[in-house]
Amino acid sequence: MLAPVLIFVYARPEHTRKTIESLASNYLASATDVFIFSDAPKNEKANEKVKLVREYIDTLSDQEIFKSLKIIKAEYNKGLANSIISGVNEIIKLNRQVIVLEDDLITSPDFLGYMNDALEFYERNKKIWSISGYTFNLDFPEKYKSEVYLSYRGCSWGWATWEDRWNAVDWQVSDYMTFKKSKSLRYKFNRGGRDMSAMLDAQIDGKIDSWAIRWCYSQFKLNMFTVYPKVSRVKNIGLDGSGTHSGISNRYDTSLNTSTKKCEFDHPELDDEIIRLFKDRFGTRFEYFVIWNKKLIKKMLRI
């Protein structure tokens, strides 16, 4: 049985259209159940764009693109973090596994095949936390022959997981004070990227509202890994300043898979060189706060 796809949309009608159209072009689209979660506008400024998004997704039911389609429209603004946590909670208990997209992600035609095959292959491997559809363009070591690799960090740009892993997340980060005071724990958490400890601090301090950093923290606590493809099945088109939580950047541009060959999964070991290359794609703690403070200042000036 194929995993259902959850798509979280908000106020970007053109991005949403591209996300849906690329998913509809997947080989397994007609065999896949899809749930679209549409968040309500946060303020009057977002009203028109949310309306346009909802008008567009309402046209999809008659097109019979997917095996089934259910649209869930929030009556009040939940924000991305609460939308994803509550939406995944609702669907994963019925299906035991989910594939998740947001409204700014273009997928390759084999995305659904890759994700479903990976979910099946790694389900019994209790060291695997999640499956990522996205990857950076990395210069892999010549000796590295696997078609996938492992990382300490989950990815929110097209991902999948199982019910037992999802239910293991401590959304309250109940041991944060211990973590905050421990240099060794903070250093270890940053194996997935130098920004991770600073992001968790910002989350707890109320400066950001991120489900993903809390998800990654639970992954770290449980010493589990995320499987990434060597060739990306997802491209993020939202780093153009249009998103609520994203600025403008080409740091994460990647090449989308065009091969029709199925990915051959195996059980690779952690590769130190790949881990280093992966980690280097994320900014330092200083860079994180510079970017965040710039965004905060801009937001304050708009008020």
Image (cartoon, helix red, strand yellow):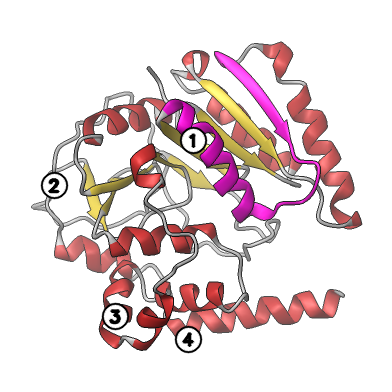
For the point 63% across and 66% down, the residue is 247
Mark 2, residue position: 268
Separation (CA) of disc 3 from disc 2:
24 Å
Choose the circle earlier in sequence order: 3 or 2: 3
Dot label at residue 213: none
Rendered image: mark on residue 107: 1
Comes first in the chain, label 3 or label 1: 1
Locate the N terminus and report the quarter of the image it occupies.
top left
276 left or right, relative to 20: left
Where does the image place residue 14, in percent across and percent down from the top left?
Answer: 73, 40
- Image x and y of residue 139, in percent: 25, 58
Q: Is the residue under label 1 in contact with that under label 3 (CB below 8 Å)?
A: no
Residue that carries the numbered disc 4 in the rendered image: 286
What is the distance, in whole Å, between disc 3 and disc 1 at their CAs? 34 Å
Determine the residue positioned at 68% across, 75% down: 295
| Disc 1 to disc 2, C-alpha distance | 24 Å
Of the two numbered discs 3 and 2 in the rendering, the one whose residue sits closer to the viewer: 3
Query: Of helix, strand and loop, which one carries label 1?
Result: strand
- The residue beneath circle 3 is 187
Q: Position of residue 270 (x, y in %)?
A: 15, 57
Q: Earlier in the sequence, mark 4 or mark 3?
A: 3
